[in-house]
Image: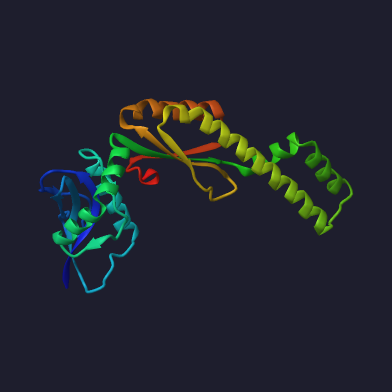
């Protein structure tokens, strides 16, 4: 077994300290979280006993614990987080890391100081409702569908053509809905990023960078938007978290 330092994040700090036990535990007591300071920057870590070349398992429990500890640290610090599984051998290696990347780390900390990230995903709850709406709103699709029904046409090529028409209309509707969300919310943010959606039902997957002092106001804007956009929508709103999408 070899002692290694598992890293959580970088903060501004002129002296080291024992932060104390944080996070989850399988052995009764959470690990003692330490802060090592060097040249005005502090690296927060925990000591781990690992086999040579062993990596910490990326289990759900470990990933959740990593995120939870970063969130707890954010209550007292602006945290520039490390990716899950980042290990160094000792505090001398921390010093070397800080010296090599000092300008970059300080620039990133300055950018996110006093700010948090909030993530918002919006999905249609019932896609059948959306497909029927697309058909009723689009004359070409409506006529094509009715023609196939009236003439009992089973030709696969024509069905594929209809499917492509519906798919194109769905993408257009997604873009329209996403534009509405962005226009409604971004005036109250510092920055935002549009991220990839992962299903037909999802039309918005957004990360927002906001001033911590504006969190309550932004929460209210999200609530207002939910009411304004009506039913058949699921809002998945997560945060605050370290602004990893804006580093």
Left or right of 59? Residue 157 is: right
Q: Nearer the viewer, residue 112 or 166?
A: 112
Residue 58 vertical position relative to residue 226 in the rendered view, above or below: below
Name, please, the residue furthest toward the right.
151
Name which residue lies at 89% across and 49% down.
151
Number of marks in picture: 0
Image quadrant in which you'd find residue 106: top left
Q: In this picture, is 47 found above or below 199?
A: below
The colour scheme is rainbow
Q: Taking 145 as reference, is 211 above or below it?
A: above
Q: Residue at x 78, y 42 (%)?
A: 141
Residue at image position (42%, 27%) is: 188
Residue 165 position, x and y percent, is 75, 46
Q: Is residue 82 left or right of residue 30?
A: right
Give the position of the C terminus as an image quadrant.
top left
User: Is residue 244 shown left or right of residue 200?
Assistant: left
Question: Visible in this render: residue 232?
Answer: no
The quadrant where residue 168 appears? top right
Question: What x and y, as percent, mark residue 196?
Answer: 52, 48
Residue 81, horizontal then vertical, whole percent: 29, 49
Rendered residue at 41%/26% (across/down): 220
Rendered location of residue 97, percent (x, y) = 22, 57
- Most foreground residue, 32 or 183: 183
| Residue 172 seen in render | yes
- In the rendered view of the protein, which quadrant contains the N terminus? bottom left
- Taking the image as shown, residue 198 lies to the left or right of residue 56, namely right
Against 6, residue 104 (above or below) is: above
């Amino acid at each position: 077994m070899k002692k290694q330092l598992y890293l959580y994040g970088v903060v501004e700090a002129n002296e080291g300290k024992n932060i104390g036990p944080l996070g989850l535990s399988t052995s009764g007591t959470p690990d003692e979280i330490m802060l090592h300071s060097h040249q005005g920057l502090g690296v927060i870590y925990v000591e781990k006993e690992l086999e040579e070349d062993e990596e910490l398992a990326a289990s759900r429990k470990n990933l959740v614990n990593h995120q939870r500890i970063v969130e707890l640290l954010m209550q007292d610090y602006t945290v520039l987080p490390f990716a899950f599984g980042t290990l160094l051998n000792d505090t001398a290696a921390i010093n070397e890391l800080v010296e090599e990347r000092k300008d970059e780390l300080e620039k990133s900390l300055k950018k996110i100081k006093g700010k948090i990230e909030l993530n918002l995903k919006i999905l249609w709850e019932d896609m059948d409702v959306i497909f029927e709406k697309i058909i009723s709103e689009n004359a070409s699709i409506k006529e094509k569908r009715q023609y196939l029904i009236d003439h009992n046409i089973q030709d696969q090529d024509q069905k594929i053509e209809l499917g492509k028409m519906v798919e194109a209309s769905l993408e257009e509707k997604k873009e329209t809905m996403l534009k509405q969300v962005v226009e409604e919310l971004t005036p109250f943010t510092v920055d935002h990023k549009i991220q990839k959606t992962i299903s037909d039902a999802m039309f918005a997957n957004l990360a927002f960078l906001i001033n911590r002092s504006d969190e309550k106001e932004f929460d209210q804007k999200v609530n207002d938007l939910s009411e304004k956009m009506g039913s058949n929508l699921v809002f998945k709103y997560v945060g605050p978290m370290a602004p990893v999408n804006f580093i």
